[in-house]
Image (cartoon, rainbow, N blue to C red):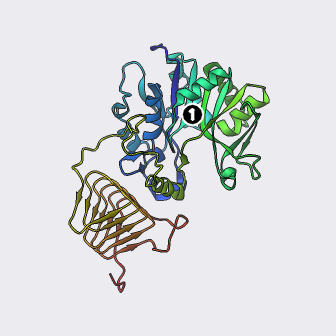
Amino acid sequence: MFCKKECIAMLLAGGQGSRLCELTRHTAKPAVSFGGKYRIIDFPLSNCINSGIDTVGVLTQYQPLALNEYIGNGAPWDLDRTRGGISVLPPYRGGDHSDWYRGTANAIYQNLAFIRQYDPEYVLILSGDHIYKMDYSRMLAAHKSHSAHCTVATVTVPYEEAPRFGICNTTEDGRIYEFEEKPKHPKNDQASMGIYIFNTRTLVEYLEKDEADPASENDFGKNVIPRLLREGAALYSYRFRGYWKDVGTIRSLWEANMDLLGDDSILKRGERDFRIYSRNTARPPQFVGEGARISDSMISEGTEIHGLVFHSVLSGGVSVEEGAEVHHSVVMSDVRIGAGARLYYAIVDSDAVIDEGAVVGSPNGGRDSITVVPAGAHIKAKKGVPV
């Protein structure tokens, strides 16, 4: 056994993210770029260290190369530690109970040996594809005060979006008496964030029960949480009141990036406490040319701007040439936007080239019609289209 920990985190980061289409064709969803200089996984990792949790297991599976390289030894998040720190936990073959992860619960079950090394009292289970800042120590304190077996973090969502989530129906003191997984007609607007704190004994007991059930889909929301309720375990809701976004779709990823440009951005300028950390790419400073115009945008290191950028988020190494225009778009690293090109309501993945005079998207577009340009794509101007 390693150094005993009160609470360790298990971060589920192996999802394919198929609804992000081309953006996750060659990389895991948590490794997708966000906000100019971040990856999605930066948020839960930063939350952990800001909350005093210094032991994190990251469970990977789909297209893990870019994610593994990005995480490295965990130094950007102060998780390069000899006692604890960060550990990447891919699926493996080596026994009766080891194979590809078959669901969120099975992924944790296959890594019970990792958990037991630290003999924790509590296990925090996280998802690697959400944008938010959260102090998990407050959730842990609430869990203890209720003497709960499991605490589920919830957030208020619009009623029209509630059928996308697991919905927690609770008593006045927050005890969960019913959990509905993606109901067609939800009874309230309190959605599970996919964040759970378990007493370790409870977690092990119910994962073993779930694994022994041949009818189970090995999923926390579909199987483990309902079983806890059926058997009378003490489940409580921890209501989170800050910004939270599930960025599992093109629309939600674009919206979350645009949310950064508002006055109440999750990345508040000048904030010293509870920062979001990321791996530094050591690029040179931005360069803004004499004829450039930039408004209501986030411009990252290494960018070179000679054209117009409006209400957009640009990652490092992006070049916007003279006469080019970028409107309401998310442009990832090392993209070249040629002279006279125009981008509207688009997400452009890394290393793409937008030729001179090319047009991507429509000025009449919006959140429901986001154009996606894949990584490394070369978009050429259409013949006969005036620049």
Give coordinates of residue 261: x percent, y percent.
43, 55
Residue 218 appears in the figure: no
Residue 81 appears in the figure: yes
Residue 148, quarter of picture: top right
Residue at horizontal 45%, vertical 66%?
345
Q: Nearer the viewer, residue 269 or 237?
A: 269
| Disc 1 residue type (three-letter) | Ala
Residue at horizontal 27%, vertical 51%?
301
- Name the secondary structure under disc 1: helix
Give coordinates of residue 385: x percent, y percent.
37, 84
Left or right: where 222 falls relative to 261: right
Image quadrant in which the C terminus is located: bottom left
Left or right: where 300 falls relative to 182: left
Give coordinates of residue 230: x percent, y percent.
79, 30
Q: How many marks overall?
A: 1
Left or right: where 144 falls relative to 234: left
Task: Name the residue carrying label 1.
Answer: 107
Residue at horizontal 36%, vertical 42%?
270
Residue 331, quarter of picture: bottom left
